[in-house]
Image (cartoon, rainbow, N blue to C red):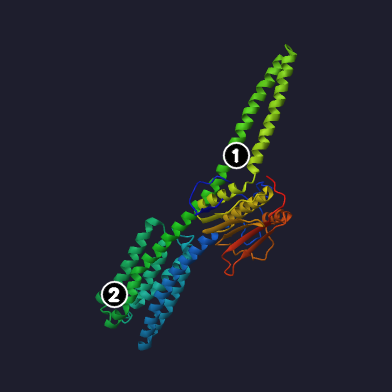
């Protein structure tokens, strides 16, 4: 049999919990392998990385923008040697530091107001001082109004949504009012040199709110997708539990109802017809035994590990979790114990990939020859919280013991970049084949 599947999004039909080698569900298993890390952080790596990129882009924009302002102000200071120009340089640097630090509030404080009134003062006071000093220094020109506009752009995402546009409009009006007040009210027209040097900063200033809000919009999309992905995994586990509970209820409910009815009949007929009552009691005992056997059969079927089913289930679960799953299967091993061991390996590997990685590509390959069976499972986006040399988890340790009992070996490996994990299980062919 030769199968090749490309990952496709389908409905989950198996649980995603840790499993003991015998197939028993083992919740909350300890983990120490490169695949595993404490529950609650396994999906945080990709989201945290996205936030770091988003924050870095916003901070970079602020750094470049403030660098333009500082360099222009330093050029003015070199020509004028004025203490006011020196003060403008210092205040611009202070305002830049406050704005860059304020970017860190964007992740948790959006729409909830400024974390503390002192942060509001730090964002506004230095920028407002530059704006005021610039009224009397026409050489500075529009550059004196830009720090206050940048502070407004940093504050706007933190205030409630109904106040966001108010903050931006007020900040823009104050920035535009600066050259008007300088020229009309104070009679200090902006120098042509200042106008020539300000156009780059003005363009950056107009793009600043667009860049900030587009980055935050993308961040919100990533968080929403990650939340839906977690919900899908939880719903899959709940669905499987409900399926098993429904099957168990169908078996137990029917038999218990019959047992209750037979027992009631036997109780009523005990004094009237002892032989009939004895017959009902005998039938009750047989029904109870049949219920016990069917319950054991249901649990055994639930625990049964069929290699072909586990391979197909792995493809479906990983695809539904958002990973591209490549499944390449050759001939199935003829030995039942070998198939069971490899099925457990597929189950354990799939569980670890789902719970302890952000894998986007998974490869599962099974090759069987006359001398051995080789299973190779690899995935990207491996956790870096545990070094590759750490002791293996209890699930992998139990699996290694089972494989060793068949004369095989289990090996794990992380590539040089630390991003790809590979699990290899090799079991030699056995001379005595069990059907």
Name above or below for residue 185 compared with residue 421: below
Residue 105 image point, x, y percent: 48, 64
Q: Is residue 135 visible?
A: no
Residue 199 image point, x, y percent: 31, 76
Camera-side residue: 22 or 224? 22
Q: Left or right: 337 with respect to 104?
A: right
> Under tag 1, what secondary structure?
helix
Mark 2, mark 1: which one is toward the viewer? 1
Which residue lies most toward the top here?
A: 272
Name above or below for residue 307 compared with residue 377: above
Identify the residue shown where x is 55% and y is 58%. Answer: 363
From the image, tell me which residue sits under label 1: 244
| CB-based contact (under 8 Å), mark 2 and mark 1 | no
Residue 256 image point, x, y percent: 65, 27
Name above or below for residue 79 compared with residue 147: below
Residue 278 image point, x, y percent: 74, 18
Camera-side residue: 406 or 379? 406
From the image, tell me which residue sits under label 2: 179
Q: Mark 2 packing: few (<14 Cα in 10 Å), some, or many (20+)?
A: many
Indicate the quadrant containing the C terminus: top left, top right, bottom left or bottom right.
top right
Identify the residue shown where x is 50% and y is 54%. Answer: 7
Camera-side residue: 171 or 41? 41
Q: Left or right: 271 with respect to 330?
A: right
Q: Is residue 7 visible?
A: yes
Labelled disc at residue 260: none
Q: Mark 1 packing: few (<14 Cα in 10 Å), some, or many (20+)?
A: some
Q: CA distance from mark 2 to mark 1?
A: 74 Å
Identify the residue shown where x is 65% and y is 58%. Answer: 425
> Under tag 2, what secondary structure?
helix
């Amino acid at each position: 049999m030769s199968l090749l599947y490309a990952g496709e999004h389908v409905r989950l039909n198996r649980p995603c919990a840790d499993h003991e080698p015998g197939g028993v569900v083992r919740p909350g298993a300890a983990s120490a392998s490169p695949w595993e890390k404490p529950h609650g952080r396994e999906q945080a790596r990709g989201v945290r990385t996205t936030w770091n990129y988003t924050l870095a882009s916003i901070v970079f924009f602020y750094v470049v923008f403030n660098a333009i302002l500082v360099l222009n102000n330093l050029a003015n200071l070199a020509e004028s040697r004025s203490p006011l120009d020196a003060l403008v340089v210092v205040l611009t640097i202070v305002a830049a530091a406050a704005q860059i630090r304020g970017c860190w509030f964007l992740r948790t404080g959006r729409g909830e107001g400024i974390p503390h009134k002192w942060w509001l003062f730090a964002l506004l006071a230095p920028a407002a001082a530059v704006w005021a000093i610039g009224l009397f220094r026409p050489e500075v020109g529009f550059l004196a109004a830009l720090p206050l506009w940048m502070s407004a752009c940093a504050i706007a995402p933190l205030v409630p949504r109904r106040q966001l546009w108010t903050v931006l409009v007020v900040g823009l009006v104050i920035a535009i009012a600066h050259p008007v007040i300088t020229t009309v009210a104070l009679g200090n027209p902006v120098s042509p040199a200042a106008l020539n040097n300000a156009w780059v900063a003005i363009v950056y200033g107009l793009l600043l709110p667009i860049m900030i809000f587009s980055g935050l919009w993308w961040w919100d999309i990533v968080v929403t997708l990650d939340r839906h992905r977690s919900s899908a995994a939880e719903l899959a586990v709940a669905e499987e539990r409900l399926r098993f509970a429904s099957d168990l209820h169908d078996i137990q409910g029917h038999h218990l109802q019959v047992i209750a009815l037979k027992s009631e009949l036997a109780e009523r007929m005990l004094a009237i017809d002892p032989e009939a009552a004895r017959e009902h009691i005998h039938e009750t005992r047989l029904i109870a035994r049949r219920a016990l056997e069917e319950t054991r059969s249901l649990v055994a079927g639930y625990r049964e590990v069929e290699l072909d089913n586990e391979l197909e289930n792995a493809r479906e679960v990983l695809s539904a979790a958002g990973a591209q799953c490549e499944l390449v299967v050759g001939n199935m091993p003829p030995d039942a114990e070998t198939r069971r061991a490899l099925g457990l390996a597929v189950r354990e590997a799939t569980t670890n990939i789902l719970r302890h990685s952000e894998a986007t590509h998974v490869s599962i390959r099974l090759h069987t020859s006359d001398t051995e069976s080789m299973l190779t499972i690899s995935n990207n986006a491996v956790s870096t919280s545990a070094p590759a040399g750490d002791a293996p988890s209890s699930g992998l340790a139990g699996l290694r013991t089972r494989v060793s009992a068949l004369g095989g070996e289990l090996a794990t490996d992380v590539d040089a970049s630390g991003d790809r994990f590979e699990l290899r299980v090799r079991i030699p062919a056995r001379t005595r084949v069990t059907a």
